[in-house]
Amino acid sequence: MSATLLNPMLPPIEVEVDERAARRALMAQIARLEGDSAALRLPSGAPPDAGRAEPAPARRATPRLLSLAELEDARDRLADRIGAAQRAAGERAEREEQARILREEMLLDPVEYRWVRVTNADIGEPGCLDWHVRPRFGLLGMLMRWWRLVISSGCP
């Protein structure tokens, strides 16, 4: 509460804001967030636009000093973008782990995973291998339940 509400007879208190200190703190936060943003690496299997930054706003013709509100807005947008990238990386890691588990289960019991295919892209590894459960000896193998896991290069 301000002093004028507590005692209307007192003159209002003027608080001086040290804009330089606030600006330095905001610039340090933005620099740290930009470093964090640069540290986030995109895997080779990520879509091409996954790490693309949002387009820069239209610039004025002359240089100017950003206000504190504009600096706070830039910091908040950068923090939101980093948070979204980290969430996406966590979700991608979870999907890759599930695909690795599926691949292990396919190796142990191919009959339960008929026609299932897992590729290197699914598990986040380089190359173009794929693991595919197929019947041995075609139609006869299907009828006799002779299923096997085939590892193929998948490359043209």
Image: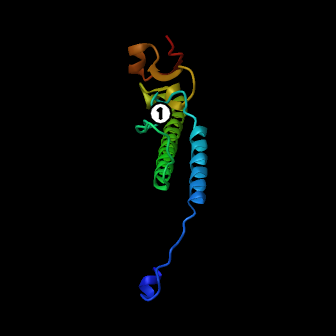
- Could you tell me residue 113's position as x and y percent? 44, 30
Front-most of residues 108 and 28: 28
- Number of numbered discs on residues: 1
Residue lying at 46% horizontally and 51% vertically, measured from the top left: 70
Residue lying at 41% horizontally and 39% vertically, measured from the top left: 57
Front-most of residues 103 and 81: 81
Coloring basis for residues: rainbow
Front-most of residues 41 and 38: 38
Front-most of residues 148 and 58: 58
Circle 1: residue type: Arg
Quarter-of-image position of residue 37 = top right
Image quarter where the N terminus lies is bottom left
Residue lying at 50% horizontally and 74% vertically, measured from the top left: 14
Relative to 80, say whether 136 is above or below.
above
Q: Residue furthest top?
A: 156
Residue lying at 46% horizontally and 55% vertically, measured from the top left: 69
- Could you tell me residue 66's position as x and y percent? 49, 49
- Could you tell me residue 150's position as x and y percent? 51, 19
Give the class, few, some or many, for how many residues have Cα within 10 Å of label 1's Cα (few <14, many ≥20): few
Secondary structure of the residue carrying tag 1 is loop
- Could you tell me residue 9's position as x and y percent? 44, 89
Residue position for label 1: 52
Relative to 29, say whether 119 is above or below.
above
Left or right of 31, for residue 79 = left
